[in-house]
Image (cartoon, coloured by chain):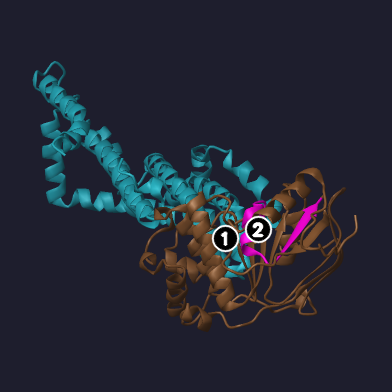
Chain colours: A cyan, B brown
Amino acid sequence: MRKKWIYGFQPWVIPFALLLTWQVTASMKLVTPSLFPSPISVLVTFWELLMSGELVRHVFASLWRAGIGLMIGGLIGFALGILNGLSTTSYRYLDSTIQMIRNIPHLALLPLVIVWIGIDEGAKIFLVIIGVLFPIYINTFHGIRNVDHDLVEMGKMYKLKGWRLFKDILLPGALPSIFVGLRYALGVMWLTLIVAETIPTEVGIGYLATNAREFMQTDIIILSIIIYALLGKIADIIAQIGEKWSLKWNVSYNKEL
Amino acid sequence: MENLKRIAADHSIQIDIEKASKSFGEKEVLKDVTLTINKGEFIAIIGKSGSGKSTLLRLVAGLETLTKGDLRFDGVPSTQSTSNITMMYQDSRLLPWKKVKENVGLGLDGNWEDKAEKVLDAVGLLSFKDVWPSKLSGGQKQRVALARALIHEPSLLMLDEPLSALDAFTRLEMQNLIETIWSTSGFTALLVTHDVREAIRLADRIVLIEDGKIAMDIKVHAARPRHMSESKLSLLEEEILDRIINGQEPKINHPRKTSNL
């Protein structure tokens, strides 16, 4: 108990030391500040952009793309995973095709997507959809397939069929695996968004960074990168909370990390 | 136990197994088995691993289908029967994502919650109704599984080595509980076990299966609750073990053979 405050403090030691080193080296001005801004000047830029409302606008544009893409791609992946997990016939028809498409690095589609869909919102969201679909598909599929067969047999003995068998046994059994897929998909989602937002646009964090590059505003570029990192971390924390909540019955998820 | 009487109405079924055979591919696991289990009877099926005793149970449960022969409940072909058959497995098979009460009420509609609490009370676990199964001991899990089987008011309760994973003390407790509940509610009980002592403690009749055939079918005449200290029962245990290990016919109880070797 006495040492608890130290545990909370430990993870922050290295980040803080790095930040301090950065501030010290930057203020020694070995490199011109326009190429190597100090953390404080990044913070000032952050404050200015926040106050002008610019930052919120860009962050929301990016969040919207990410969210819509995740929702559509996630739903398709989830539905396909459930379908192929439950039906061997459907699995035989669909799975090898899905695996073929999955093996194309989706970011390699970028030039084709620009030519076919254009450079507006659709192209960016499309890339996110393709990116998140497969991790969710695979993990949902395996989750359903690996549900304890004994529990399914027990459920049938107690006359569970169709929707109830799915809701009471198959889905909860597959949930841990589905969450693994979701968290992996979130990582892919941000990565895809960063690349997709280099397609010319007028709003979004990617735009913020690309635009800043034109004017050599290194502080804004660094700020954009930090925002991407923060958003990624926040999304993961939210997914983790959802995971903990829905798996509260599972002892191994209840342990304090 | 009064509660239980109201929950589990006094009904039970007769099971007729006639010339039943079951093969898995080339391997014939059950060979021409004929067996009648009377209404309300507590029957124990014993045998070594791989003797076919579990297959017989799974056939009656409808988890396997017969290759040859007939299976009837109260004279009706088992596939058309509407009798309530429930089962306790070796592992409790509770759903870890449902709390105890929800596990007991699995698959039920309407006002199941009161009933669930009544059966939980009957197995002595009412205070655990809002607990996750992962917090229960092995014996408690099996009590919940028993409650889940009882809430359906079974006319046949099948017990697939449900106590073999428990420690000796818990096993005795559970045997008493099962016996009490069986004698109160009056369902037909079919226990598969390789614990001869357990079979003698609980069953009206013991059927030994060897190599897919019925090798022995004897009645246990003793008042309940039974104590293994009774010399008659320990003698019977010795005789049966002798029969299993050395292939000798038991001398007491005048075995009623239903199958010729």
- Position of B60 with respect to A112 (left or right) is right
Q: Is residue A169 a member of the stretch shown in magenta?
A: no
The chain under label 2 reads B
Q: Based on the displayed image, in which of its 4 quarters is residue A213 positioned?
A: top left
Q: Which residues are magenta?
A: B192-210
- Position of B66 with respect to B44 (left or right) is right
The chain under label 1 reads B
Quarter of the C terminus of chain A within the rendering: top left
The residue located at (49%, 60%) in the rendering is B173
Residue behind mark 2: B233
- Label 1 secondary element: loop
Cβ atoms at labels 2 and 1 below 8 Å apart? yes
Report if residue B243 is visible in the image: yes
Seen from the viewer's position, the closer of residues B69 and A27 is B69
Considering every residue shown, the one lying at the far right of the view is B260
- Label 2 secondary element: helix
Q: Position of residue A233 (x, y in %)?
A: 30, 43
How dense is the environment of label 1, judged by Cα within 10 Å: few (below 14), some, or many (20 and up)? few
Residue behind mark 1: B227
The residue located at (40%, 42%) in the rendering is A187
Q: Position of residue A203 (x, y in %)?
A: 30, 49
Report if residue A72 is visible in the image: no
Q: Based on the displayed image, in which of its 4 quarters is residue A198 positioned?
A: top left
Mark 2–mark 1 distance (CA, rounded to whole Å)? 8 Å
